[in-house]
Every structure is written in structure tokens, then in C-alpha cells.
Amino acid sequence: MIPDDSWCSPDPALQPLLDASRERFVLDPEGYHGPTHWQRVYLNASLICEAEGTDPLVARCFAFLHDACREDEGRDSGHGARAAHFAVELREQGGVLPLDELGFERVVQACRHHSGRLVTLDPEVMACWDADRLDLLRVGYVPDPARMHTAFAQRAETIRAACDRAEAWVRGSSDLG
Ligand SMILES: [Fe+2]
């Protein structure tokens, strides 16, 4: 389920992280890369991890981190590296990122490379990237199964359901505007 309030974390343990990302985020919260997108990535990540038998914590943290340091709604080629740096800052601060050392390294890698073409064999990092990519319809692209890493995200039903959620958001945004 996606919460009505996009600043509310479905997992209370990740609320401090979502609050920290909210504080850092400088773009329009109603925009393409704002918290409504993060919540859909969170849901996609949860579904992928459930289907693949992967621990979802890294991908859920990624959902709330990966676009938090964007400076524009376009390509913003530095935003992955900034998100990785932000994760390091939060780690040093303590109490915000409930990850062990390996989980932390995974989320840093996932953030740093999420808009590139790097390939990974790590199921937790694959879940991050697929969860983000499944929400591409909001910016006009149907996700390509060939670019997905996990079997679950490659399925036509998974892509269709994710597109339906993204499309509902686009429709809701244009009704408001
Ligand atoms: Fe994203």
C-alpha cells in the first residue's frame, strides 16, 4: 500500500530517513522525482524482494535516498553521486540509516550508479534499480524488461501493474493542475 501522505514511511523504522531526505530535498514535492515517486519505488522494491526472497531493507532505504539530492527534474548526472554522499553523511550522523556495514555499502553503490548502465549480481542492489525503473511511465517511458535485472521485474504483469500506479499518479497530478 502507498500511504496517502507521501512523507509518511510505511516502515516506522525508516521515518527518520524519510524526514532527513525531506529536509535535503529542494525540488517540488509534487514533481516527477519527489516523495510520491519514492513511495512507488518503495512499493516496487517491497514487491520485488518478496517475490525474489531478498531482504527488502536496502531497497527501501534506496527508495527514500536515491533522488533526495536532485537539483533538477532532468538528467542531473551528479544526483546519484550526491545521494551516495548523502548516505555517508547520514551514516556518520547516526540513528537514521538502520543498516549494517554491508547493507550500507550496498545502498551507497545502488545510489551512486542508479542512473548508469552498470551491471550487478547483488540481488539487493538489483532490487533497488529495478524498483526505480518500474516507475518510468510517470516520465513517459514504458519500462523495458531487457533493462531489468530481476525475473519478477521482467514479467509483463509486474510492469503493467507498476505502469498503472505511475499512470494513476500522472492523471491525479494533471487533475490538480
Ligand atoms: Fe528515482
Image (spheres, grey):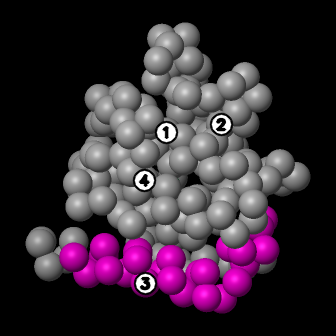
Is residue 34 in view from this perspective?
no
Q: Is mark 1 within 8 Å of ligand 1?
A: no
Q: Is residue 155 magenta?
A: yes
Q: Choose between 103 and 24: the one closer to the eye.
A: 103
Asked if disc 2 and disc 4 are in contact, CB closer than 8 Å, the reply is: no
- What's under tag 3, amino acid-wise? Asp
Q: Choose between 54 and 159: the one closer to the eye.
A: 54
- Residue position for label 4: 38
For marks 4 and 1 on the same chain, the one whose residue lies earlier in the sequence: 4
Q: Position of residue 35 (x, y in %)?
A: 34, 51
In the rendered image, the vertical position of residue 173 relative to residue 37, given as above or below: below
- Residue position for label 1: 65
Q: Is residue 55 magenta?
A: no
- Residue position for label 2: 107
Residues in magenta, as a range: 148-172
For marks 2 and 1 on the same chain, the one whose residue lies earlier in the sequence: 1
Q: Is residue 67 left or right of residue 100?
A: left
Q: Label 2's element?
A: helix
